[in-house]
Image: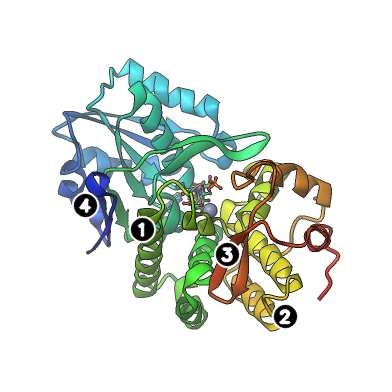
Amino acid sequence: MQTLNLDLGDRSYPIYIGQGLLQRPELLTEHLQGKSAIAVTNTTIAPLYLAAVTTALAAYKHSAVILPDGEAYKNLATLDQIYTHLLEHQADRKTTLLALGGGVVGDMTGFAAASYQRGINFIQVPTTLLAMVDSSVGGKTGVNHPLGKNMIGAFHQPQAVIIDTDTLNTLADRELSAGLAEVIKYGLIRDPEFLTWLDTEMEALLARDPEALSYAIERSCRHKAEIVAADERESGQRALLNLGHTFGHAIEAAMGYGQWLHGEAVATGMVMAAELSVQMGWLTQAELHVIRHLLERAGLPTEPPTTMTGDDFMRFMSVDKKVLDGSLRLVLMKSLGESIVTADFDPAALNRVLHRDRVS
Ligand SMILES: NC(=O)c1ccc[n+]([C@@H]2O[C@H](COP(=O)([O-])OP(=O)(O)OC[C@H]3O[C@@H](n4cnc5c(N)ncnc54)[C@H](O)[C@@H]3O)[C@@H](O)[C@H]2O)c1
Ligand SMILES: O=C(O)C(=O)C[C@@H](O)[C@H](O)[C@H](O)COP(=O)(O)O
Ligand SMILES: [Zn+2]
């Protein structure tokens, strides 16, 4: 087992990464504060992994909320189901929530923990690659609104992140690829050597080679932990983690949550950010090709939906959380492995990218 630490002073927490960690109850129980815990999961994950968590909690008062599965349910109505369960089971300020699942379960459980009785503890037990490398770490929690992705939420850090890489054995191929989008993102924003490693190891990752996967998870978590430790509330460099997301979130919302997976939308968004970076004269056509090819090899889409117009993009992009005083800021690429957050791009070039009118 590898243990990383996210350093946030007295709110620091460990990130455990290894095989078979769900069979080690002490990893969970050492982070429980009181005598009760409530697991939050969904209808797909419960039959696979809830028993292991329930066994670990045998000595505690415990119960489980089993939510419907899907991005379409990441909303206030589903959150209300969690609050109702907490009240019906008399959860108090020492109750700990356990988020057992992917990013959807993790984001909703985290927000329930941030808001129930004005804040209780929670632990992340991610079971998708995407949640292991990204969403379980860093304390961004929340739900979607029909008019914008993750628009209602809070920063609330977990007590611990427990990554049992064995759970990836049951994950669908499409979901594995979606997780690889966020892994590739770290390479594109700050780690060119990681991009080279990913290029070499892509087949091993897709074949679920345990060593390759655990290396990718560890290196990704290190990046995320470093960035969050330096800028927990996204006043600066944390916004780099949004590479591809301004475009990607627009795709997710415009298409109806769940049609495009988050990782798929981010992959396409990263290519759109790269296209704009080419038009700004920062990235070469050859570098754009490298990015597109790597994402395609990971099994990801790189072209936006044909049904989306430039106006559809702009409608959703104009409420992006990086908009300040009405001015849109984007994460763009200066070179392979170096990104910046900037409002200083040519609006006509953005228009060409959104309208798929590519000028090289
Ligand atoms: N908070 C953050 O920092 C952050 C970062 C990235 C993404 N996100 C959010 O995360 C969400 C996407 O997360 P995701 O990609 O994990 O999707 P997800 O949570 O919908 O999970 C994907 C699918 O895999 C299933 N599943 C989960 N674990 C499984 C397993 N081990 N075996 C079999 N099936 C399994 C789920 O039931 C679901 O059907 C989005 O809502 C996105 O906005 C948040
Ligand atoms: O942790 C972050 O910061 C991120 O931006 C990680 C992203 O991968 C993630 O999708 C996040 O939820 C997007 O945040 P948002 O603030 O744009 O909703
Ligand atoms: Zn993301």
- Pick the front one: 76 or 50: 76
Q: Which residue is mark 4?
A: 23
Gap between marks 1 and 3, in whole Å?
19 Å
Gap between marks 4 and 2, in whole Å?
48 Å
* Mark 3 CB near ligand 2 (8 Å cut): no
Q: Which residue is mark 1?
A: 225
Q: Amino acid at mark 1?
A: Ala
Q: Earlier in the sequence, mark 4 or mark 2?
A: 4
**Callouts 3 and 4 close, C-beta under 8 Å:** no
Q: Quadrant of the C terminus?
A: bottom right
Q: Secondary structure at mark 3?
A: strand
Callout 2 crowding tier (Cα within 10 Å): few <14, some 14–19, many ≥20: some
Residue 51 in the image: state x and y as whole percent. 28, 41
Q: Earlier in the sequence, mark 2 or mark 3?
A: 2
- Of the residues tagged 4 and 1, which is closer to the observer? 1
* Scheme by which the image is coloured: rainbow
Q: Earlier in the sequence, mark 4 or mark 1?
A: 4
Residue 115 in the image: state x and y as whole percent. 40, 27
**Callouts 2 and 1 close, C-beta under 8 Å:** no
Residue 157 in the figure: left or right of residue 236: left
Q: Which residue is mark 2?
A: 285
Q: Earlier in the sequence, mark 2 or mark 1?
A: 1
- Of the residues tagged 1 and 3, which is closer to the observer? 3
Dividing the picture into quadrants, the one containing residue 287 is bottom right
Q: Residue at x 50, y 77 (%)?
A: 195
Q: Secondary structure at mark 4?
A: helix
Gap between marks 4 and 1, in whole Å?
25 Å
Q: Which residue is mark 3?
A: 340
Q: Which mark is residue 202?
A: none
Residue 86 in the figure: left or right of residue 335: left
Q: Is residue 143 above or below residue 181?
A: above
